[in-house]
Amino acid sequence: MSEYIFKLPDLGEGTVESEIAEWFISVGDQVNEEDLVGTMMTDKAAVELSSPVSGKVIKLAGEPGDVIAVGAPLVIFETGASPAEVPAPAKTEPAAVHVPAAAPVEPEPVSAPGEATLERKRVMTSPAVRRRARELGVELSFVPGSGPGGRITRTDFDLYVKRQAAAGTRPRAPVAPTTEVKVIGLRRIIAERMSEAKREIPHFAYVEEIDITELEALRQHLNGTRSEPSERLTLLPFLGLALLRALRDFPQCNTTYDKTRNVLLRHGVIHLGIATQTPDGLKVPVVRNAHAMSLDDLAAEIRRLSLAAKDNSAKKEELSGSTITITSLGKLGGIVSTPVINQPEVAIIGVNRAVERPVVVNGQVAVRLMMNLSSSFDHRFVDGYDAAAMIQSIKEMLEHPATIFLPR
């Protein structure tokens, strides 16, 4: 018998250290070669690592949230092979971006009544599915996987939960009065970036009320001509198109700040970030070259990227590089919000909920569909007058939607 030390491999792109996001093994487990041992996370990607050997786990490098240097011991195995017979691990390339969120300590699995007691097996799935399984108390070894090698996809998991609920056998997660949740993974990165943004950027907030009655009438008219539900328009692409037009007159808002060189980069192209809430936390997929798109093209790309961000199929380059961001809470949008600027950008446009309100129109009280825009600007580089003027330009186009499509 001998020990084999599995060291953290080079994850690429100059990574010198990585955070433990999740373990799939425990001390004492018997592991086969190529079994998944855990997920390591860099600033850009989550990487699932497989065991290079078969053996018994006798030591793990740390707990989720601990940071490990490349080349440092990650897992120590007790193997039956001599050291000379154990192959060295190959360099690991980062997988497609799927960033795991912080998760509570895993409870004992609860199987549904009537299910046979099966030997627990190692399952292959994404960190997001594992987190949801913990939240719902679902034992993943019972979930059929349709992916390569029996990997459980998000669709597989959702279908299993739906069937269990329909049969009245859906397990319930154990109730605990207090649970410690480590701030790791995407939640840690969000916390760090939000703190940095609020600490370094003097935010200037500006809120404007907009009458979108005519815009909503146009939207409903256009949707009435579309047979496919997936092609129907939301308000977001109209707002995006109005913002793209307004930025032609206010290029200082389509800017990023390079603090290391103390230089403002005023961009000729517009890469529009769309803040998207996902099961793993907030992500900002990016519509590249949005300024060159039509209304339908913009709507289709927003829809595609938002879905990709939610199901973890978005590519790394689709989650970075925006020059200005739109954020919306949809029906939860409230009346006013104070969005935090997405560094290194200098502006973010926040969308609040659209509601019918009594307003005065031509001296008469009328019911109109009203919506607020709550936006934030980096006051170091965007003057209050210019911020207000840009939002007023957007307001004018949204209240007279035909002007969105006129050449400027």
Image: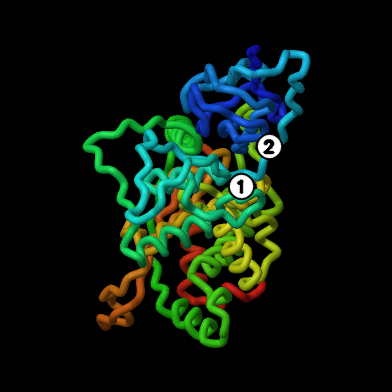
Tell me if 19 is positioned left or right of 261 in this view: left
- The residue sitting at 66% across, 45% down in the picture is 96
Asked whether residue 373 appears in the rendered view, the answer is no
Choose between 239 and 221: the one closer to the eye: 221
- The residue sitting at 63% across, 63% down in the picture is 301
- The residue sitting at 67% across, 61% down in the picture is 291
**Residue 304 appears in which quarter of the rendering?**
bottom right
Dot 2 corresponds to which residue? 94
Estimate the x, y position of residue 321 in percent, counting from the top left.
64, 45
Does the CB distance between marks 2 and 1 fall below 8 Å? no
Q: Where 355 sits versus 387, above or below? A: below
**Residue 57 appears in which quarter of the rendering?**
top right
Q: Where does the N terminus fall, quadrant-wise?
A: top right
Kind of residue at disc 1: Leu
Estimate the x, y position of residue 178 in percent, counting from the top left.
25, 34
User: Coloring scheme of the render?
Assistant: rainbow
Label 2: state its secondary structure. Answer: loop
Assess disc 2: are there few (<14), some (14-19) or many (≥20) residues with their C-alpha within 10 Å of its C-alpha: many
Assess disc 1: are there few (<14), some (14-19) or many (≥20) residues with their C-alpha within 10 Å of its C-alpha: some
Estimate the x, y position of residue 289 in percent, counting from the top left.
69, 57
Circle on res. 319: 1
Q: Where does the C terminus fall, quadrant-wise?
A: bottom right
Estimate the x, y position of residue 367 in percent, counting from the top left.
29, 80
Kind of residue at disc 2: Pro
Q: Where 383 sits versus 245, above or below? A: above
Choose between 100 and 251: the one closer to the eye: 100
Tell me if 104 is positioned left or right of 149 in this view: left
